[in-house]
Amino acid sequence: MYDPTVARLTYRALLGRRRALILGILPLLLIVISVAVRALAGADDQTAADLLGGLGLATMVPIIGVIAGTGAIGPEIDDGSVVYLLSKPIKRPTIIFTKLIVAIAVTMVFSALPTLIAGFILNGNGQQIAVAYTVAALVASIAYAALFLLLGTVSRHAVVFGLVYALVWEALFGSLVPGARTLSVQQWSLAVAHKVTGGELVTSDVSLTTATVLLIAVTVLATWYAGQKLRSLTLAGEE
Amino acid sequence: MAVEQPLATPAGDQSRIHDIGYRGYDGPRLGRGYARLSLYSQTLRGSYGLGRSVKSKVLPMLLFAVMCVPAAIMVAVAVATKAHDLPVSYTRYAIIMQAVISLYVASQAPQAVSRDLRFKTIPLYFSRPIETADYVQAKFAALASAMFILTGAPLLVLYLGALLAKMDFAHQSKGFGQGLVSVALLSLLFAGIGLVIASITPRRGFGIAAVIAVLIISYGAVSTLQAIADSRGSAGAVPWIGLFSPVTLIGGLSAGLLGGTNTFPGDGPSHAQGVVYLLVVLGVIAAAYGLLLRRYKKVGL
């Protein structure tokens, strides 16, 4: 199910040349802001939770997820070089699974790790906040990577639709319409984080059972359907 | 048409150009200005998907509708309740809708420039009588115009609604004018930033993500820092922090100079700080234009 060559090529496509630098700017910004906040405001649990939740989990993790998830397959389909990969005797679901593993790994490294560091800078893991949001970021990485990898195989405008989901649905509708929060990766991952650390500052609107079931269902279904899409992929011209 | 086969001659003075029967062009030559205008109008139409496939019309039209519908609802509510003023001021509307505006510029800026880079059509443009500056001006102006249509249309809806509801004409016109100035600056600023980022990468997807990251993350970071600075008793720092993201730049400019509602926590920028905001906005626009010129001096040639 895992093909090292495909994985190596995907890593190179995602992180090769200057792309790793660009991916690294966002986490670096989070850490810089954490240092600034700590210097400006001192250690405060509520501030730490607001910053990690609002900027880290709600904005940075989805954006990294979009870049890594769609970037793992989108550009190849876009410029047509995916045919060279598809013509090799490798199962299409294997290709998707390998790319998913790579996308998850990249999203985790560039989102969960900086969240942990930023949490420790902000309040030294007081009330387990740093660990809670790191767990949330890890869980969210898996679901986002699977979801956006599927988008990458379905649409040529995957990045836009991924961002519309992350920013408009989760952030805007999620804050206005409570019902929208039930269908939000962010809330599911918060439910898991809440269970893991049992803190008061990390809460979710979704129960743990619902969240876990939905997380697993979304990840598995998205990966399976992406494999099916790749099996019947047709290369169309520009638009 | 019979073609004279060039003889295999050694290099020397034997070479000549054969007439192989292509017809010459003796129609009018429309020149540089016309080429620039065509590039402008094609890019502007392309920004709303006009003259392109149905699929590429969906997103810009959808975002345009999302921009205008809240304005229409506000007007309807204001008319129905016989309010004396609009629920949201003209300068504030764009700040509320910043996510939609950011998504629009992120999706359309790479549309305007990345495909030319990817399909290597840039040399073809410059084989026409246009120069680097013409290309940059046309693309910049087209995207800024598209953004102005996107951000100006809801203001027009608000203004017409306010006049229909018989609100104070002078007051509304002044607010509308101030709103238009602020969205004009916003259009230029966002178009400049979007184009500079998009022109670096030939990959459309990567360009979109990079533009969104710069606009949204910087806004999120700046508003977080502002809220913390305000609650920690260093309210004097709030307007200066606002200088570091495009959305708050426009927000601070409208609040400081154009009499708009303050969107910052605390007191908001003073008149003098508004001047600083204006200078920074103009500086960023000029810098974006300069960077684009520099980029297209070399790219693809």
Image (tube, rainbow, N blue to C red):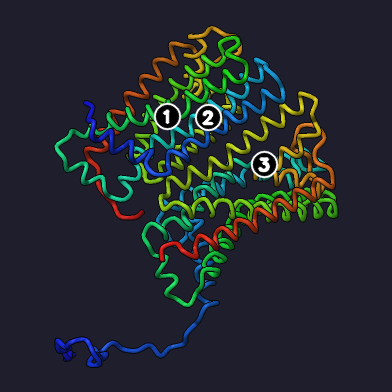
The answer to whether residue B88 shows anywhere in this view is yes
Within-10-Å neighbours for mark 1: few <14, some 14–19, many 20+: many
Q: Which residue is mark 3?
A: B244
Q: Which residue is mark 1?
A: A107
Amino acid type of the residue tagged 3 in the rendering: Phe
Which quadrant, please, contains the C terminus of chain A?
Answer: bottom left
Could you tell which of marks 2 and 1 lies nearer the N-terminus? 1
Indicate the secondary structure of the residue bearing disc 3: helix
Q: Above or below — where is A45 with respect to A225? A: above
- Binning the other alpha carbons within 10 Å of mark 2 as few (below 14), some (14 to 19) or many (20 upward) gives many
Q: Is residue A117 above or below residue B68?
A: above
- What chain does mark 1 sit on? A
Q: Are marks 1 and 3 in contact (CB under 8 Å)?
A: no
Q: Position of residue B266 (x, y in %)?
A: 80, 32
- In the rendered image, the quadrant that contains the N terminus of chain A is top left
Residue A126, position in %: x, y?
Answer: 60, 11
Q: Secondary structure at mark 1?
A: helix
Extreme top residue here? A198
Residue corresponding to mark 2: A170
Q: Position of residue B213 (x, y in %)?
A: 53, 40
Chain containing mark 2: A
Q: Secondary structure at mark 2?
A: helix
In this image, B234 relative to A169: left or right? right
- The reply to whether the C-beta atoms of the residues labelled 2 and 1 are less than 8 Å apart is no
What separation in Å lies between label 2 and label 3 (alpha carbons)?
25 Å
From the viewer's perspective, is the residue at label 2 or at label 1 nearer?
1
Say which residue appears at 24% left-offset and 33% top-offset: A95
* Chain at tag 3: B
